[in-house]
Image (cartoon, helix red, strand yellow):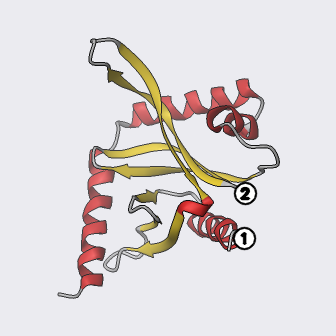
Amino acid sequence: MEIGQCADEYVAFLFVRAVTLGPKLSETVKGKLSLGARILQAGGVERVFRQAFSAEKGERLVKALQCYLYTTSGPIAGMLFVSTRKIAFRSDRSLTVTSLAGDVARVPYKVVVPLGRIKRVQPSENADNPEQKYIHMATVDGFEFWFMGFVSYQRCCKYMQQVISSQL
C-alpha cells in the first residue's frame, strides 16, 4: 500500500469519525446561535477577530469562514480567521477545563499560527469519496492542523494560499 493511499484512508477514517462522533444537532445549533450573538454584540466578524486574537497594527482580516478543526478528542466547530499576519481558529462553544486546584472555567478553544511559522497548507480530498475535502496545515515546528466541513472549501483554500504566498 502506498503512503498516499494510507494517508487518504486515515483522513477518511478521521472524517467519518468526525461526522459520527460530532456534537448533537441541538448542540451545534446552540453553538451557531451563540456565535451569531457574539458577532452581533461585538459589532461584526472583524471585531470578534480583533478581540479574540489581539490583532497587530496594520493587520487586516482577509476572510472568516466556519469550519471544524479536527483534534484527537474529535471535531470542534468554530470559525477560521485568515488575516494578513496569521491564521487563527476559535471554537463556537467554550470548553470546560479544570485546574489542578479543582477550579472550573469555560474557555474557547483557540489556535493561532503566524504566517511565518506555516510550512505548508495542502488542500486534499478523500480518494474514495472526493466530496470529503479537508485542508491540512503544517507548521515549521512540526504541528499539524486539519480543517474540514467548509461551506466553501475552494474559497478557503484560495484565501489561505493567497496570504501565505504573500509572505514569501
- The image quadrant of residue 168 is bottom right
Q: In terms of secondary structure, where does tag 2 sit? A: loop
Q: Which residue is drawn at 53% across and 64% down?
A: 118
What x and y, as percent, mark residue 98? 31, 20
Above or below residue 157? Residue 19 is above
The residue carrying pointer 2 sits among few (fewer than 14), some (14 to 19) or many (20 or more) residues within 10 Å by Cα, namely many
**Left or right: 72 as drawn, with respect to 120:** left
Q: Residue at x 71, y 41 (%)?
A: 55
- The image quadrant of residue 100 is top left
Q: Which residue is drawn at 35% across and 36% down?
A: 24
The residue carrying pointer 1 sits among few (fewer than 14), some (14 to 19) or many (20 or more) residues within 10 Å by Cα, namely few
Q: Which mark is residue 130?
A: none
Q: Which mark is residue 84?
A: 2
* Three-letter amino acid code of the residue under disc 2: Thr
**C-alpha span from label 1 to label 2:** 8 Å
Q: Do the residues labelled 1 and 2 touch (CB within 8 Å)?
A: yes
What x and y, as percent, mark residue 48? 68, 34
Residues 42 and 52: in front is 52
- The image quadrant of residue 46 is top right
Residues 70 and 117: in front is 117
Q: Which residue lies furthest to the front in this view?
A: 141
**Left or right: 78 as drawn, with respect to 100:** right
Q: Residue at x 34, y 24 (%)?
A: 97
Residues 30 and 148: in front is 148
Above or below residue 137? Residue 31 is above
Q: Which residue lies furthest to the right in this view?
A: 58
Q: Residue furthest bottom?
A: 2
Badge 1 or badge 2: first in the primary sequence: 2
* Three-letter amino acid code of the residue under disc 1: Ser
**What residue did someone put label 1 on?**
166
